[in-house]
Image: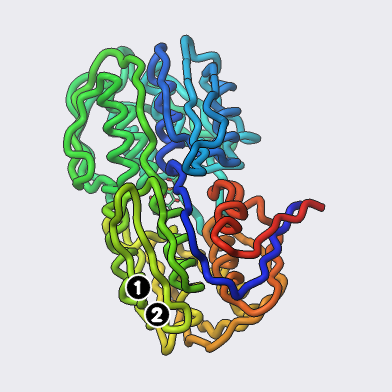
Amino acid sequence: MDRIRIVGGNALNGIIPISGAKNAALPLMIASLLTSDTLTLENVPHLADVEGLIRILGNHGVDIAVNGRREHQDGSYSRTVHFTCRTVADTTAPYELVSKMRASFWVIGPLLAREGQARVSLPGGCAIGTRPVDLFIEGLTALGAEMEIDGGYINAKAPKGGLIGARYTFPKVSVGATHVMLMAASLARGTTVIGNAAREPEVVDLANCLNAMGAKISGAGTSTITIEGVTSLSGARHRVLPDRIETGTYAMAVAMTGGDVTLSGTDITLLDTAIEAIRRAGAEVSAVDGGIRVIGHGDAIRPVDIVTEPFPGFPTDLQAQFMGLMTRAHGVSHVTETIFENRFMHVQELARLGAKITLSGQTARIEGVTRLRGAPVMATDLRASVSLVIAGLAAEGETMVSRVYHLDRGFERLEEKLTRCGAIVERISD
Ligand code: UD1
């Protein structure tokens, strides 16, 4: 199993190209199940989760052609991928595949809309909480589907003639359930109005792509989304939006180590709340042509309290990284997690580096320390693992992060991007 070795202490200076967003690419890829034409996606990141979903979609009958593996002039590495699902070969998504990645459960929406039925294993994914699927069941039931749980699978069946548009308000904001409702309602008969919809930029990206395919969706990016069903969707060409979580992660790394880095190919407006928190912590962050410039001052980090919330609030996917940053702040800060109940597994690993963190319910109290010391640590989930890398970059001596397969799910060529900016980071394959 690969490990990542970091020798901390170097400031970061240079350019880091930001990849296409994993959390946008996954639902966009799944949308290819809605049409017999080709959906072409540009700026698809090369990640373990994307490769995993390619296998899952292949099982459903999607032909996939990849080009653009070459490196671009600016050091970015985006790929263009063509997805064509002439006919759906299989409406079952088996346990072996779905258990590895929660987002693959989302195939339930397009399969049900296009084929009138789906049998999908209950999901797996990061071990950050119970992550139930009740909202998917309720939402699809509102569109007329019969939903039944049987032997670890959900059997879903649309009424004769297909799903029927309806009004449905989510009792809780869910990104995945909003994606699934957008896809399912696009091919339903009549109009669907979704209340309390997720407002994440990735939802807007999916809606834009579906509209390019012929869907009639309005209101994406607000809490109320209206979808007028159409009888069929066509192919389209769409560019995956930049990864705001990768953007925020590297911005926090620079705030932590000090230095001057331009994050290219990204957009500051995708993560206003996180940028505000990074600024309050003392780093200078500004929009520049084609990206964001971050100037960090390393030793002068100020304590900042944050609370994770659905977009436009502070993203839960940046919580661990921000806690990493706060371990070196001059004073006490608090990080409160409201989205996932078990998303503090990085706390004990950060403590191995010398961080002083106490947990009380869903809030962590972080007392900043003047220095962190390198140590062996273990990645426990995708975002937690990168918080250990950030902390390792600022720690004295060597940090060895094991179980880096978590990192490979969501961060494209992390060691290379950091090394180019002066960090000492290497992958060790045993
Ligand atoms: C997506 C993101 C993930 C991010 C999360 C919250 C992808 C691939 N993943 O995950 O990186 O951390 O949004 O921003 O885009 N819930 C229920 N019932 C349901 C569904 C969800 O109670 O049926 C709960 C979850 O347990 C959680 C909350 O709703 O507490 C939000 O989860 P959700 O927005 O659905 O997360 P994902 O879409 O799985």
The answer to which of 396 and 344 lies nearer the viewer is: 396
Please report the residue visible at 47 percent of the width from the left and 27 percent of the height from the top.
80
Q: Quadrant of residue 381?
A: bottom right
Q: What residue type is labelled 1?
A: Ile
**Residue 395 horizontal side relative to residue 320, left or right:** right
Q: Where is residue 414 in the image (x, y as percent from the top left)?
A: 58, 53
Q: Quadrant of residue 33?
A: top left
Please report the residue visible at 72 percent of the width from the left and 71 percent of the height from the top.
376
Q: Which amino acid does label 2 sit on?
A: His
Tags 1 and 2 in contact by the CB under 8 Å rule? yes
Q: Give the Cα separation between the discs numbered 1 and 2.
A: 6 Å
Please report the residue visible at 58 percent of the width from the left and 63 percent of the height from the top.
422
Q: Where is residue 396 in the image (x, y as percent from the top left)?
A: 64, 79
Mark 1 or 2 closer to N-term? 1
**Residue 210 horizontal side relative to residue 14, left or right:** left
Query: Residue 334: which numbered mark, if any?
Result: 2
Query: Residue 124: which numbered mark, if any?
Result: none
Q: Position of residue 25 (x, y in %)?
A: 44, 36
Q: Work out whether 118 lies above or below 204.
A: above
The kind of secondary structure element at disc 2 is: strand
The kind of secondary structure element at disc 1 is: strand
Q: Work out whether 250 lies above or below 20.
A: below
Q: Work out whether 372 lies above or below 24.
A: below
The answer to which of 257 and 223 lies nearer the viewer is: 257
Q: Residues within 10 Å of mark 1 (few under 14, many from 20)?
A: many
Q: How crowded is mark 2: few (under 14 residues within 10 Å), some or many (20 or more)?
A: many
Can you tell me whether the CB of the residue at mark 1 lies under 8 Å from the nearest atom of ligand 1?
A: no
Query: Residue 306: which numbered mark, if any?
Result: 1
**Residue 343 horizontal side relative to residue 239, left or right:** right
**Residue 197 horizontal side relative to residue 67, left or right:** left
The answer to which of 389 and 155 lies nearer the viewer is: 389
